[in-house]
Amino acid sequence: MAQARKLHDQYFKKAKEEGYAARSAYKLKQIQDKRGILKRGDWVLDLGCSPGSWVQVASEIVGDRGRVGGIDLKPVEIEGGTPGNAKTLVADIFKSDGAFLLGILVSEGKPVRLVDVVLSDMAPNTEGGGGGSMDHFRSVDLCRRVLELCPSLLRPGGNLVMKVFEGEVYPELLKDCGKMFADVKGYKPEASREVSREMFITAKGYRGGPLPTTPLPHGIAKAPPAPMPGWGGGGA
């Protein structure tokens, strides 16, 4: 526990020093170093983007030729302002379709196109410290919504990163991702707290096609998770 707290302090302080909205910036940086999800010039959608650290990191990587769009139930208020190649809106992924989400990235009068990368650091409002059984199923619900949106958002060959709490149906979720993407791996960045059950599914080479479905265990509600206080990964 002491080691986990030390790790938290390390990345929390580093984020403050380097101007990131939260320590979660280093999770995406480490995912990028490990898996090369983003590249210069990419168009990126960040689902559950508050407080904005992944928007900051993605905007740095894609550069001036790239675009980053983000949504969350909470407004994003980055100290110093949102990067010039990025835009965020307050919206709910369960009430937003692909056309609306793609529109976040497009300037007026410009054509809409599919994105190169979809990111999701979303997590449900956790109870009892995060990562318990119901938190796991709620996080899987969020991931399934992301997968439902992929056909209307992600270009063939595109990449995906999404957070899930490990648990009973995590292996099935990985299998379903493997039906949609050519290269799927689970990865836990060093910047994640040691005690956290969060895992990041990193998927490359989107194949398109219909969404595979794996039924949830009996008794698990399929309704969207309770939205408050926001889908964003925050500083966790």
Image (cartoon, rainbow, N blue to C red):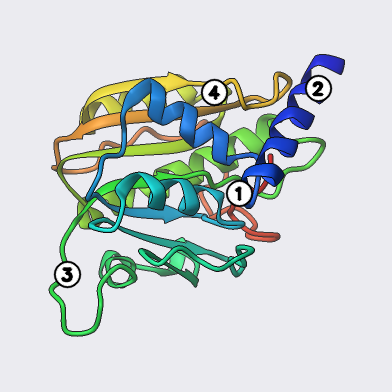
Q: Mark 4 points at which residue?
A: 189
Residue count near mark 2 (Cα–Cα under 10 Å), binned few <14, some 14–19, many ≥20: few
> Distance between the Cα atoms at labels 3 and 1?
29 Å
Mark toward the viewer: 1 or 2:
1
> Distance between the Cα atoms at labels 3 and 4?
33 Å
Q: Is any atom of residue 218 visible in this view?
A: no
Nearer the observer, 152 or 204: 204
Q: Residue 6 — which label? A: 2
- Residue 172 in the image: state x and y as whole percent: 40, 24
Residue at 55% from the left image edge and 68% from the top image edge: 81
Classify mark 2: helix, strand or loop.
helix
Classify mark 3: helix, strand or loop.
loop
- Residue 42 in the image: state x and y as whole percent: 24, 49
Q: Is any atom of residue 216 visible in this view?
A: yes
Residue 75 relative to residue 42: left or right: right
Of callouts 4 and 2, which one flags the residue occurring earlier in the amino acid sequence? 2
Q: Residue 20 — which label? A: 1
**On screen, 131 above or below 211?**
above
**On screen, 25 above or below 132?**
below
Residue at 45% from the left image edge and 54% from the top image edge: 47
Classify mark 1: helix, strand or loop.
loop
Mark toward the viewer: 4 or 1:
1
Name the kind of residue labelled 3 in the image.
Val
